Amino acid sequence: MQELFDRTPSRERPGLLSAGVVVRLLDLLDEERVIDPDELSALIGAEDLDEATCQQITDRIQRVQAHLSRAGRRRDEVAALFASSRELAEQREFDTLLRRLVQRARDLVGADLAWLSELDVPRGELVVQAAVGSVSAELERLRITFGQSMAWHVASHKQLHYSARYHDDPRFRHNLNADSVLVAEGAVSVLAVPLVAGDEVIGTLCVATRTETRFHPEQIALLTAFADHGAVILQGARLLAQAQTSAEEAGEARRRLAALVERMEQAHNDHVELTECVLRGQSVAQVAAVLATSMRREVFILDTDGQPLVDSPAHFPVEGCWRHPEVVAAIATSRSTGRYVPTSAPGVAGVVAVLAGDTHLGSLVVTRTAELLDPVQLKTIEDAARIMALLRLKQDAQADAEERVRGDLLHDLVEPGSRGTEEVRIRARARGLNLDELTRLFIVSAGSDRAEVLRTLRTMPARPSLVAEHAGVVLVVFAESARTDGKHLHRWVRARLRLPVLVVEAPHASSCDEVAARYREARRCLDMLPALGIHDAAVATAAYRPYLRLFEPNADDIDEFIRTLIGPLLDRDEDRGTELLQTVSTFAECNASTSRTARALHLHSNTILQRISRVDELLGPAWREPDDFFRIQVAIRLHRLRGRASPNPDPAG
C-alpha cells in the first residue's frame, strides 16, 4: 500500500498507479453505480502501464463492483424481508395476514401471480386460502387432492420446486383441475416453497410469471427465507387466533355459568317462597301469583274439569284458550308424565298437571310471552305444581278433619239424645256457629256419589253453615239469614253433577231443639218421592204432608180404610190369581166405559163385563154409585202408593 500511495509520479515509477487514480477508482466504486467501461479504460489508460496490467486492473475493479452490487442487493432484500416480516407480525386479522403475506411474496421476487395453499389434514387436501394477481376467482376456491400437483410435491418432500415451464414439467404428478386453473391464469414459470413451522408443514407458497422466467438463486433464497418467516408468523397467528377463540369461548362459558348460577339462585329463592306458601297455609291462587311474578308472565289454574279455578277468564291472553284442543291434549299428556308440556295454542306456552299420586287435582296454565322459558324455569314450574299438590293435600286433609267435626256436630243436631244440647252448643261455638240460628235444613240425594255432592256443595258461593253425609244422604244446614232455597241448591248440584238430584227442604225450625223432628219429616218425604214418580226436583215437605200421613209407620186407620173398601178384591186376587183390582182401577180411569177398559187392558169387552159382574158379587151392586166409587178409587190409589213406597221406619238405620 505504501507503494500504491507513493507520491512519485507513475512515469518515474513504472507499473504503479498514481494516488489520484486510486482515489478516483475508489470514488467510482463508492457511487454504487455501474462503472462505464470507457470511463474506466480512459482513467487507467492515462497511466504508464502496459496493456496486460491495465486489463488486469479493469477485471479486478469490475469484480469488486459486481461483489458490491450483489452485497447491496442482498442488503436491500434482507431489509425488505425483515420489513415484511415485521409488518406481517403486527397484523392481527388472519385473513388479512394471508393476503399481505402473498402480496409480499409476489413483490419480493417480482412475480405476476402468487398464492398460498394450506394443508387440511383431516380431508387430505391442499386448500388455496389467498391469491394475489389472479384474473379469476377460481384460484382462491381451488382444492387439490392428496399427492397431486406441484404444491403437494413440495409439501410432501419439504423442498422447494421450480419449473421454468410448469405445464411440461414431468417431475411431479399433475392435477387436471389445478392445471386448468393455471392455464386460465396464463402461468408459465412457477416457483413453490414449503411453509414449515418446526417439523410441521402447514402449506406451500407459490409464485408464478406469465412469461418463461429464470429465477435467480438470490430470488429463490429470498423467497425461501420469507416462506420460513411467513410460516412462523402464520403458525403464530393461527395459535393466537385459536387462543383468542378459546378465550372468547371461556368468556362465553363464564357468562353462561354466571347466568346459570343467577337462574339457579332465582330458582332457589322461588322454591323457598313457594314452600313458605305451604308453611303459611296460603291458597293455590297465591302460589300461582308467586310463580307468575317469578316467570314474568300470567299463570292460571284449571280445576279437574279443565275450567279456570282462580281469576277471571277475561284475564287470559286469548278468550277460551284453555279449551283449545292442544291445551286439552297437553293436560292429558302431563297427567301421564307429570312434566311440563309445551303447546302451540294461541296465548298458551305450556301446561303442567297438578298431581298427587294418581289423583288429578287440576292444572297450571303458563301464558306465552316473547321470552322463551329456559330449563331452570321449566323445573321451577314443575316444582310449583308439586307444591300446589302438597298444598291441596294439606288443605284437603284440614278440610276433611274440619268436615268430620262438623259432620259429628250435624249428626248430634239431627239425632237427639246422642249428645246433650249444651255440649252441642259449646262445640258449635268453637266452630264460630250459633246453634240457635241453624234452623234451615235441606236433604240432598243424588244416587250413590255422595262425595261429589259434598264437594260440590262446599264450593257454593253462599257456603252452608254445616254440610255432611248422614244415613246415606247429604244434609245441608243454613242459618236463618241465608239467602238460598231448595231450588237454588238443586240447580247448583244438578249443573255440576249432570245427574238427577232430589232436594227436600224441611220446615223452618223455631229452635235447634226442633231440627231433629224437621229432619225426620223431611227424610220421610224423601223416601216417599220415588213412589210418586219424582226423581229430579226440589220440593218442600209442606206440599206433601197429606202423603206423609199415609206412610207413617203407625197409620193403622189407613190400612183399615183400605181393607174395608177393597179387601174382598185383594183377597180374591191373592187366592185365585185374578186381576179384579187392576180391572176396577182401569175401569175408573176410563170413566166407567167397558169398551175403553177392554182396549186399555187388551181384553174382549165380554171379559170385562164378566169381571165387573164378579166385583158386583164381592162389593155389592152399589159400588158404582158416585160416592162409593170415589172412595174405592181413593183406596186403590192409596194401596198402590203404599205398595210402591218402602219407607224406612228408622231413618238412621
Image (cartoon, rainbow, N blue to C red):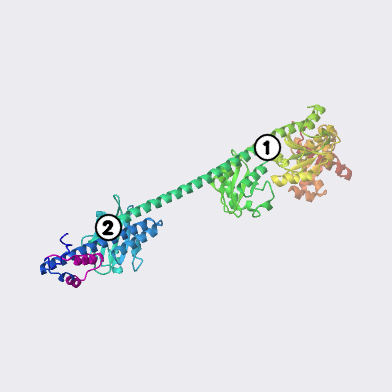
Marks 1 and 2, how far apart at CA: 83 Å
**Image x and y of residue 153, in percent:** 25, 57
- The segment highlighted magenta reads 15-42
* Residue drawn where x is 31% and y is 66% of the image: 113
Q: Nearer the viewer, mark 1 or mark 2?
A: 2
Which secondary structure is most common in the magenta stretch?
helix
Which residue is more in the foreground, 151 or 68? 68
What is the crowding at mark 2: few (fewer than 14 residues within 10 Å), some, or many (at least 20)? many
Residue 101 appears in the figure: yes
Residue 526, percent across and down?
Answer: 77, 39
Q: Position of residue 358 (x, y in %)?
A: 59, 39
Which quadrant: the N terminus?
A: bottom left
Circle 1 sits on which residue? 281
Position of residue 144 measured from the top left corner of the image (x, y, whole percent): 30, 59
Q: Considering the numbered disc 1 on the image, is that residue within a helix, a strand or a loop?
A: loop
Res. 219 image quadrant: bottom left
Q: Is residue 448 visible?
A: no
- The amino acid marked with disc number 2 is Thr
Residue at figure coordinates x 72%, y 33% from the top left? 402
Q: Earlier in the sequence, mark 1 or mark 2?
A: 2
Numbered-mark total: 2
Secondary structure state at the residue bearing disc 2: helix
Which residue is at a point 30% across and 58% down the rendered structure image?
226
Along the viewing direction, whichever of 575 and 399 lies nearer the viewer: 399
Residue 136 horizontal side relative to residue 358, left or right: left
Q: Is residue 314 above or below residue 430?
A: below
Q: Quadrant of residue 640?
A: top right
Check disc 1 and give the amino acid type: Gly
